């Protein structure tokens, strides 16, 4: 169902634009993955663990920025906040390209994450401005499908750029990506939040909005489950390159395999878009998590047995992880946002900030348990999806009780 129609942009173009804004985060993370060994050699004396902080501090900045961009967009409008975030992102990327010592690059990445929160969060609020209910979930699914195409190509793009310019050239690609996406937004999409619908930026209003969200049982549960799914993804991103290189000896071909898996997983988002209106958001998330409980448990057993061809089994399991996220995250966002249309910007911020910061805190210790096998990732994924599955069953019970009232 559409709550408001954009007068100058068609639905297909709108979806593509929102997908690109969402993909700012994915491109900023995944394009850096093949650069981590070179960054370690150039800036950290070969310490791969320190080089991985390039990813961690970006996520920290994004999580912090996520909390503020939504309320600002509720007060000032959607587009000004996107412009400000993009400006910070571009300047930070330029600093990262220029600096030749590790700490300034880390600081630049933190502020780059802070800026990237603008397009990511405001895109979710814009979608809620224009759509609601299962219609919103369908739009989110298609946007997520586009979003998954970026990880399919980002590591390969990063590797190609490194071949010509070294890892610093990747920061230049970030600048180009942001200029194109924000320029597209500025030229084609009108402001979606009219002045009369804006909320003043006041502390007590922000506090009341947060309280309202976490008092709503369905919203609260969907945020927690989304946090667990994002933690599963963060754990995968932190460990995937070492697993390919150390466990399976596929470090050189990592961008190809990673891209192939990400590309195929886009079919899950397309499938979700086709069936979500008929089957419903909660049911699809519950089914996806139940399936992953079985697959993660099987992968844990397989990594213990060290069977021949284990790499290809791991590859299929990695695909299933991405497919689980494709079915879950868009639907969980739609579930949480649907009752919160009157505070869409704030709701998008709370959902994004909580799920990002809490997921990073949960996932970070997983990397400490890496032992040269895929078992820590399998254990973490099994734990996250099992808890999420139980919470989704609880959500279903709440919905059935409310339906009888």
Image: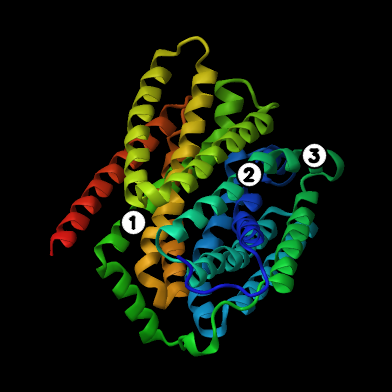
Q: Mark 2 points at which residue?
A: 149
Of residue 289 and residue 191, the one placed in the foreground of this image is: 191
Which x, y percent locates residue 194?
54, 84
**Residue 311 appears left or right of 153:** left
Q: Mark 3 points at which residue?
A: 160
- Give the distance between the C-alpha atoms of the residues marked 1 and 2, in whole angstroms: 25 Å
Residue occupying the point 68% across, 65% down: 89
Q: N-terminal of the two: label 1 or label 2?
A: 2
Direction top: furthest residue: 308
**Residue 333 appears left or right of 146:** left
Element class at badge 3: helix
Dot 3: few (<14), some (14–19), or many (≥20) neighbours within 10 Å? Answer: some
Kindly report which numbered mark, 3 or 2, lies closer to the viewer in this rendering: 2
Q: What's the colour scheme?
A: rainbow
Dot 2: few (<14), some (14–19), or many (≥20) neighbours within 10 Å? Answer: many
- Give the distance between the C-alpha atoms of the residues marked 3 and 2, in whole angstroms: 17 Å
Residue occupying the point 53% across, 73% down: 69
Element class at badge 2: helix
Residue occupying the point 55% across, 28% down: 243
Number of the label disc, if any, that sits on residue 222 = 1
Element class at badge 1: helix
Which x, y percent locates residue 1?
45, 65
Kindly report which numbered mark, 1 or 3, lies closer to the viewer in this rendering: 1
């Amino acid at each position: 169902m559409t709550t408001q129609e954009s007068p100058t942009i068609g639905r297909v173009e709108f979806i593509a634009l929102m997908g690109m804004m969402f993909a700012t985060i994915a491109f900023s993370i995944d394009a850096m993955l093949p650069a981590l060994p070179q960054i370690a050699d150039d800036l950290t004396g070969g310490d791969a663990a320190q080089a991985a902080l390039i990813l961690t501090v970006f996520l920290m900045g994004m999580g912090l920025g996520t909390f503020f961009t939504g309320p600002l967009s509720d007060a000032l409008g959607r587009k000004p906040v996107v412009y400000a975030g993009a400006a910070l992102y571009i300047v930070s990327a330029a600093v990262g390209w220029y600096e030749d010592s590790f700490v300034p690059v880390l600081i630049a990445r933190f502020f780059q994450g802070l800026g990237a929160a603008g397009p990511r969060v405001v895109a979710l609020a814009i979608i809620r401005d224009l759509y609601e209910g299962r219609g919103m979930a369908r739009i989110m699914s298609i946007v997520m499908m586009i979003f998954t195409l970026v990880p399919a190509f980002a590591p390969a793009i990063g590797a190609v750029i490194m071949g010509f310019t070294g890892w610093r050239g990747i920061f230049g690609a970030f600048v180009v990506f942001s200029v194109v996406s924000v320029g597209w937004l500025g030229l084609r999409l009108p402001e979606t939040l009219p002045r009369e619908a804006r909320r003043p930026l006041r502390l007590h209003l922000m506090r009341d909005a947060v309280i309202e969200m976490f008092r709503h049982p369905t919203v609260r549960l969907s945020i927690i489950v989304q946090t667990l799914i994002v933690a599963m993804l963060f754990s995968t991103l932190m460990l995937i390159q070492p697993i390919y290189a150390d466990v399976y000896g596929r470090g050189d071909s990592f961008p190809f395999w990673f891209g192939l898996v990400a590309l195929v997983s886009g079919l899950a988002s397309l499938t979700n878009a086709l069936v979500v209106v008929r089957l419903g958001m909660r049911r699809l998330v519950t089914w996806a998590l139940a399936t992953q409980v079985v697959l993660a448990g099987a992968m844990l057993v397989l990594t213990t047995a060290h069977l021949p061809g284990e790499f290809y089994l791991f590859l299929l399991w990695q695909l299933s992880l991405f497919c689980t996220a494709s079915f879950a995250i868009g639907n969980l966002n739609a579930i949480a946002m649907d009752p919160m249309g009157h505070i869409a910007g704030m709701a998008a911020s709370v959902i994004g900030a909580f799920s990002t910061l809490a997921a990073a805190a949960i996932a970070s210790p997983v990397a400490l348990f890496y032992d040269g096998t895929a078992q820590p990732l399998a254990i973490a994924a099994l734990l996250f999806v099992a808890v999420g599955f139980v919470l989704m069953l609880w959500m279903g019970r709440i919905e059935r009780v409310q339906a009888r009232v």
